Image (tube, grey):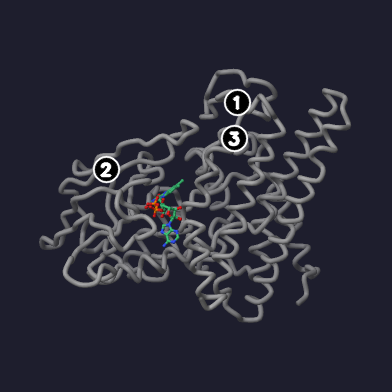
């Protein structure tokens, strides 16, 4: 296993750095830093998306005919690491990392030709209608019902935790089209317009008061048969295919290292203000511990890349990475909160456009909200308990 970058890869890394120096403005970096929500604000993410799309670097893994690049796995790793190091906003995954790859893998030519450019150009903004009040980890229990009438399906039921449904113009959904067999059978995958009388979006605020997700109620909502992916009653296989993309995301330690650098900055600022070396020494061990974990994740990512380069499949490593990265993100947010002490108690509204001055240093503003919102990372995309079940089966043979 060779972990050193080649000359060509170093040249590529420099090209990425030059692009980021030019296009990633301080305003974008600050907007990304300032938000406490799990998902970047739509307008910030879409501004960054448009710059990447213009450069042709928005969807590196997609086929070139649909806007992708010819980058190898190492180049993709370099690109995402450099973006994380430079503080680039996270892109919104529902279009780019979920329905897009699914359409490319399982969509018809007509669906691909119509929807893929609209995802890249930002004409469509997607949300994901999988979970229901009675179906989360046990997703196959979903009950939102669709009945076929000619070239349409009529949908009735409720979806929940639907991220950015209040901002999206499109939703992809799992619906029940048959109740007679096993619960995994009788599920169908549909795409539909959010802007129609049969859809009502009800906000749910996070405990940090951010409006990220919603409950979506369908009352005779309409989807067209041409917007079905896969066959009727065969949506479970389609859903599982999509979840592989949802879980395999993540920069593998680079984002965590950049968050740890932020704690270092806070610690050194605070210790210079209170003129106490003790303050730094209290946190030195804890920061080192987190840094070691982040580096271990980074090297594990590189190990996975190295095996991909030699043609192997990553297997249950995507569950391992999801668990390690999200557990570490939570630990980092806990330490950041501990470092700012009493300033973490005050509620600071981080929604864009707030005119309220920050309480304490501007850098403290998003810390408490992030700490609260990041509890979600070990739940969404398949909770970490579910990932551990997968590893227990696939790695330990239990
Ligand atoms: C921030 C955020 C954004 C989300 N966005 C979306 C979205 O856009 N669209 C969407 O469809 N959904 C979304 N979700 C929902 C998410 O997919 C579900 O929350 C998740 O699948 C868990 O389901 P649940 O909340 O019903 O919890 P449950 O499934 O009820 O689980 C409750 C607890 O029991 C544990 N548990 C359950 N089953 C097992 C088991 N077999 N073994 C061990 N432990 C188990 C779980 O790990 C969890 O700790 C989002 C969730 C969050 C937090």
Identify the residue at image location x=51%, y=76%.
398
**Dots 1 and 3: beta carbons under 8 Å?**
no
Front residue (pair 321, 196):
321
Q: Does residue 237 appear to the left or right of 378 in the view shown?
A: left
Mark closer to the observer (2, 1): 1
Label 2 within 8 A of ligand 1 by Cβ: no
Q: Does residue 322 appear to the left or right of 293 in the view shown?
A: left
As helix, strand or loop, the secondary structure at mark 1 comes to loop
Q: Earlier in the sequence, mark 2 or mark 1?
A: 2
User: Which residue has dot 2 on it?
Assistant: 195
User: Which residue has dot 1 on it?
Assistant: 345
Q: CA distance from mark 2 to mark 1?
A: 39 Å
**Dots 2 and 3: beta carbons under 8 Å?**
no
Label 3 within 8 A of ligand 1 by Cβ: no
Q: Earlier in the sequence, mark 1 or mark 3?
A: 3
**Dots 2 and 1: beta carbons under 8 Å?**
no
With respect to residue 285, does 118 lie above or below? below
Q: Which mark is residue 370?
A: none
The x and y percentages for residue 241 are: 41, 69
Q: Which mark is residue 31?
A: 3
As helix, strand or loop, the secondary structure at mark 2 comes to loop
């Amino acid at each position: 296993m060779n972990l050193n970058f080649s000359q060509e890869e170093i040249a590529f890394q420099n090209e990425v750095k030059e692009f980021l120096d030019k296009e990633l403005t301080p305003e974008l970096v600050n907007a990304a830093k300032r938000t406490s929500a799990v998902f970047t604000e739509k307008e910030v993410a879409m501004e960054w998306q448009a710059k990447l799309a213009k450069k042709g670097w928005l969807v590196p893994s997609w086929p070139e005919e649909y806007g992708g690049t010819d980058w190898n796995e190492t180049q993709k790793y370099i690109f995402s690491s450099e973006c994380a190091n430079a503080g680039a906003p996270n892109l919104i995954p529902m279009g780019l990392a979920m329905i897009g790859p699914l359409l490319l893998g399982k969509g018809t030519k007509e669906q691909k030709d119509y929807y893929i450019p609209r995802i890249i150009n930002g004409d469509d903004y997607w949300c994901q209608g999988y979970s229901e009040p009675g179906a989360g980890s046990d997703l196959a229990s979903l009950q939102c019902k669709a009945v076929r009438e000619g070239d349409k399906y009529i949908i009735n039921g409720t979806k929940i935790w639907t991220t950015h449904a209040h901002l999206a113009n499109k939703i992809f959904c799992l619906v029940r089209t048959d109740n007679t067999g096993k619960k995994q059978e009788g599920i169908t995958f549909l795409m539909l317009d959010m802007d129609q009388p049969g859809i009502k979006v009800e906000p749910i605020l996070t405990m940090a008061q951010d409006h990220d997700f919603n409950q979506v109620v369908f009352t005779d909502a309409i989807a067209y048969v041409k917007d079905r992916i896969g066959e009727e009653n065969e949506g479970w296989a389609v859903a599982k295919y999509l979840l592989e993309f949802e879980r395999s995301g993540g920069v593998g330690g680079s984002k965590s290292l950049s968050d740890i650098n932020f704690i270092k900055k806070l610690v050194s600022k605070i210790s210079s203000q209170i003129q106490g070396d003790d303050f730094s020494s209290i946190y030195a061990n804890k920061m080192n511990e987190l840094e070691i974990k982040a580096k271990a994740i980074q090297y594990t990512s590189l190990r996975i890349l190295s095996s991909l380069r030699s043609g192997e499949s990553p297997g249950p490593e995507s569950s391992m990475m999801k668990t390690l990265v999200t557990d570490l993100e939570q630990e980092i947010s806990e330490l950041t909160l501990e470092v700012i002490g009493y300033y973490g108690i005050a509620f600071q509204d981080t929604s864009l456009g707030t005119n309220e001055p920050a309480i304490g240093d501007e850098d403290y503003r998003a810390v408490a909200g992030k700490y609260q919102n990041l509890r979600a990372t070990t739940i969404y995309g398949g909770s970490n308990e579910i990932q551990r079940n997968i590893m227990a089966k696939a790695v330990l043979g239990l």
